[in-house]
Amino acid sequence: MGVDSFLVKPIFPTNVVQEFERIARRNHITKARERGKAELAGRRILLAEDIELNAEILMDILSMEEIQADHAENGSEAVEMFQKSAPGFYSAILMDVRMPVMDGLEATKAIRALNREDAKTIPIIALTANAIDEDVKYSLQAGMNAHLTKPVDSDHLFQLMGELIMDANP
């Protein structure tokens, strides 16, 4: 019948994109224009994650690409760490959305409001178990550049980080 795949309801934007990418790979379809991607090895990332086990797993995943990660246990700590760092010290921020003290949405707004140039341009990627359209909308409205659901697909994370870092530093 010509059907390449199917999606199970409820349909989430991230699932649609991932399924299109899977179909393209399976059918050997290449992108019309390959998007630029920054080298990730040697980059420093700020990881805001309140659950220690999740933070350890993410830090292990990041180390696979030789990315150095500094861990903040909540949004308030992430804002403080970013604020105390030199401009350009961090290449991106991975921000859990649901955290104690200050959640990821509030932390992102606080970082974007800082009076320094990199606060406006640093890629901030939401990490959350919530994948409904409304959660994605809140993340983007708070100033995040992208919204990934947990568990994180490492290949997708690295591709997205490379693209966002490249876009932030033309």
Image (tube, helix red, strand yellow):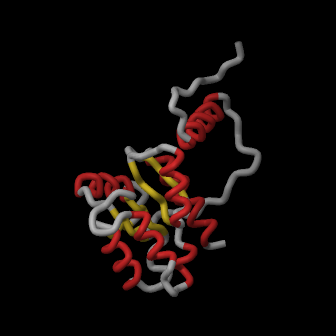
**x, y (%) of residue 61?**
37, 53
Q: Is residue 13 positioned above or below 8 on the image?
A: below
Query: Could you say which is closer to the camera, residue 135 or residue 19?
Result: 135
Picture quarter with the C terminus: bottom right
Location of residue 94 by image quarter: bottom left
Query: Could you say which is closer to the camera, residue 120 or residue 135?
Result: 135
Query: Could you say which is closer to the camera, residue 109 or residue 90?
Result: 109
Q: Is residue 72 visible?
A: no
**x, y (%) of residue 162?**
55, 60
Q: Is residue 77 positioned above or below 114 on the image?
A: above
Q: Residue at x 49, y 43 (%)?
A: 132
Q: Is residue 23 positioned above or below 94 on the image?
A: above
**x, y (%) of residue 67?**
41, 64
Picture quarter with the N terminus: top right
Q: Is residue 87 visible?
A: yes
Q: Is residue 23 positioned above or below 129 on the image?
A: above
**Residue lying farthest top?**
1
